Image (cartoon, grey):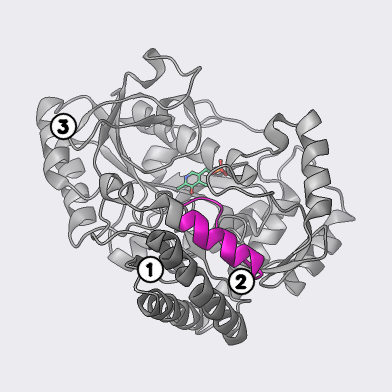
Amino acid sequence: MKVSESGVLYEEAKRVLVGGVNSPVRAFTAVGGIPRFIRKARGSKLQDEDGNTYIDYVCSWGALILGSAHPRVVAALRGAIGRGTSYGAPTRVETELANLILDAVPSIQRIRFVNSGTEATMSALRVARAYTKRNRTLKFEGCYHGHSDSMLVKGGSGMATFGMPDSAGVTKESISDTIVAPYNDLNSVKTVFEQYPDDIAAVIIEPIAANMGLVPPMPNYLQGLRDITKKFGALLIFDEVITGFRASIGGAQKLYGIEPDLTCLGKIIGGGLPVGAYGGADEIMELLSPIGPVYQAGTLSGNPLAMTAGIVTLRELRKRGFYDELKEVSARLERGLLGAAEEASVSVRLTRVGSMLGLFFTGEPVIDYQRVKSSDVHAYATVFSSMLEQGVYFPPSPFETLFVSAAHTQRDIERTVGAARVAFQQVRKHREH
Ligand SMILES: *Cc1c(COP(=O)(O)O)cnc(C)c1O
């Protein structure tokens, strides 16, 4: 595979962009190799600047549930762009997208659009603190809630603990109100609440963890969190930036039948344009300015292009059978990958919820960050590189989720599974040496 053009572009990029990229994982640091510079994308395929095409399982980190350049999204954007790209004033498309979201997610009575998932979680936490008049937040190890200071923290091993910052430049003070507990462990949550019964404003969680690979919640875990937060008067925030309109039309909360107090959205609701949103009960959301005392604003918030792409995308998702078909194609991929690993005698754990898949090289069930970490990252890197060479673009990190879109065909899956057979054999060979 020729990648010289990407190589040249990467060198040029590094001279002006930090590390050559604008988001770290794109640099392929965890898997090695030259990051592919993408020229264009259509449906399930990416094409790089050397002309190589790849079946795309990143899908812009889950945002592209319809695949790239969906004809209806493109047509709507063409129409919208001629009417101006931003006004800094209200538009009808904001209300229209809000209505589509509220219809699908009943726990949201009132919503606010922002420009990223990071802003959505940061602002939801601010509202939660104002509403409860409490300061502390409980988050879970391995869950990602964007890069705002208070969320850039991981936990100590196993036990619930006050975290240390994950990033230089984040002060101890800015994370001093963040408590971290292991995922899928209700007892540790109980312990935290017994220690701080009146101090915790909110528990924030990815209801299906999708930023440490894919780790689904154990049975009754989310219900347990709902019960504990109710009991102690804390809010439950579902960060559904990935799972919203992905796990089901109503997100993970609909799939598992749990109503959070606040929900954060992003990715899919922007149809591939920059967007985020947070919402919940009127009583809580009305604390926001201009009605209430909690300040939050955005120059480009509710951007007409992002709203337009979101509206068209969500309309497609409402079509009958959409999620069933997506699930079927994804299940076929899951079976194929498992078969390929078995053929090569490489032990893997595959997790899947709908069209999200996690691929771990471990013999243990993956239920929390500790166990995720036991996955063989070298094996993942081998598979990643082999797949890429064969025209399949898996996420360039062992701890990310694979996404299937509605544009992925049976033929794409067959080709992917064929490539995986070769890739898993390479893992075995490496291990034999
Ligand atoms: C992507 C993501 C975010 C951050 O969204 P950005 O738009 O990248 O700021 C927050 N939470 C979850 C669960 C995410 O997957």
Looking at the rendered structure, the secondary structure element under dot 2 is helix
Relative image position of residue 271 (x, y in whole percent):
65, 60
Mark 1 or 2 closer to N-term? 2
Asked if 91 appears above or below 329 in the picture, the reply is above
Between circles 3 and 1, the one closer to the viewer is: 1
Question: Does residue 247 show up?
Answer: no
The residues colored magenta run 380-398
Q: Residue 252's quadrant in the figure?
A: bottom left
Q: Which one is nearer the viewer's eye here, 242 or 366?
A: 366
Dot 3 amino acid type: Val
The amino acid type of the residue labelled 2 equals: Arg
Q: How many marks?
A: 3
Say whether disc 3 or disc 1 marks the residue closer to the N-terminus: 3
| Residue 361 image point, x, y percent | 36, 60
Q: Spatial distance from mark 3 to mark 1, Cα to Cα?
A: 29 Å
Q: Quadrant of the C terminus?
A: bottom left
| Disc 1 to disc 2: CB gap under 8 Å | no
Circle 3 packing at 10 Å, graded few (<14), some (14-19), many (20+), is some
The verdict on label 1 being within 8 Å of ligand 1 is no
From the viewer's side, name the closer residue of 234 and 334: 334
Going by the numbered disc 1, the residue's amino acid type is Val
Residue pointed to by mark 3: 192
Q: Quadrant of residue 427?
A: bottom left
What residue appears at the point 37 percent right and 55 percent down from the top-left corner? 107
Q: Secondary structure at mark 1?
A: strand
Read off the residue under disc 1: 353
